[in-house]
Amino acid sequence: MQGLSKKEIEIVANLEFKKKYYFTKEDIAKYFDSDNKMRFTIFKLRKKERIIKLNRNKYFLIPIKAPKSKWTDNPFIIADEIMDGKDYFIGGWSAANYWKHTDQVPMQVDIWTTRRQGKVKVLNSQFVFHRTTKERIKAMATTCKIKEHSFKIMKSKEAKRWVKGK
C-alpha cells in the first residue's frame, strides 16, 4: 500500500483483519497517545481516500482489496451506520422496492429521522433525510436484516400505501 505510513498500515490492516469496516474514533484510540495525533491520522487517511466519514464519530474503511480505492456497501447498511441504528427508518421508493411493491430502482435512499435533514452522498449512494417524529418512527418502522446487519425500514403495508399515493 503505497503512500501509507507504518501507523496507517497498522490501523487499516488491523481493522480489516477484524472485518471492522465501520469504526469509531474509540476503536482506533489505542494506537495513539493523543487525540491530536489520532485526528491528524484520520485526516490523512481521509485525504488518501482510505476511509470515509459517515457522521461525527463514525467512519467507513475502504478495504485494501478495493480497486483504485473504490468500494461500496449496501445502502441500507450505510444508512443504519450513518444514523447509529436509532431514530430513523428507510422509506419512499427504497422501501417500496425492498418490499417488492415496485420494480422501479430508486435513485436515492430516503431516510425519515428526528435528527437531521438535507442530502448527502456516501459511497456512490445518495441519501435524502426527512424530518419526522419518534411516534411516527415507532408506528411505521420495522427491523430487517441484510448480511447479519439490522436496519430499520418502513413497514410493508405503509410502503404499499405510500406507492399508491404517488
Image: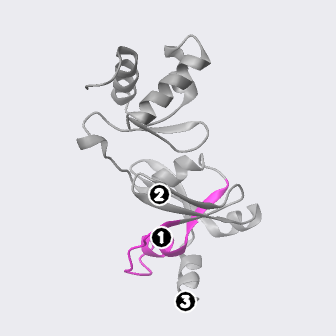
Amino acid type at circle 2 is Phe
Return the disc, 1 or 3, that comes first in the chain's sequence. Answer: 1
SS class of the residue under badge 1?
helix
Q: Between marks 2 and 3, how big is the CA–CA gap?
A: 23 Å
Query: Eyeballing the image, is 116 above or below 8?
Result: below
Q: For the point 53% across and 47% down, which residue is it?
A: 81
Magenta-colored span:
87-109
Q: Are marks 2 and 3 in contact (CB under 8 Å)?
A: no
Give neighbour class at mark 1: few <14, some 14-19, many 20+ (Cα, 10 Å): many
Q: Are marks 1 and 3 in contact (CB under 8 Å)?
A: no
Q: Are marks 1 and 2 in contact (CB under 8 Å)?
A: yes
Give neighbour class at mark 2: few <14, some 14-19, many 20+ (Cα, 10 Å): many
Amino acid type at circle 3 is Lys
Front residue of 114 and 156: 114
The quarter holding residue 110 reads bottom right
Q: Which residue is mark 2?
A: 76
Give neighbour class at mark 3: few <14, some 14-19, many 20+ (Cα, 10 Å): few
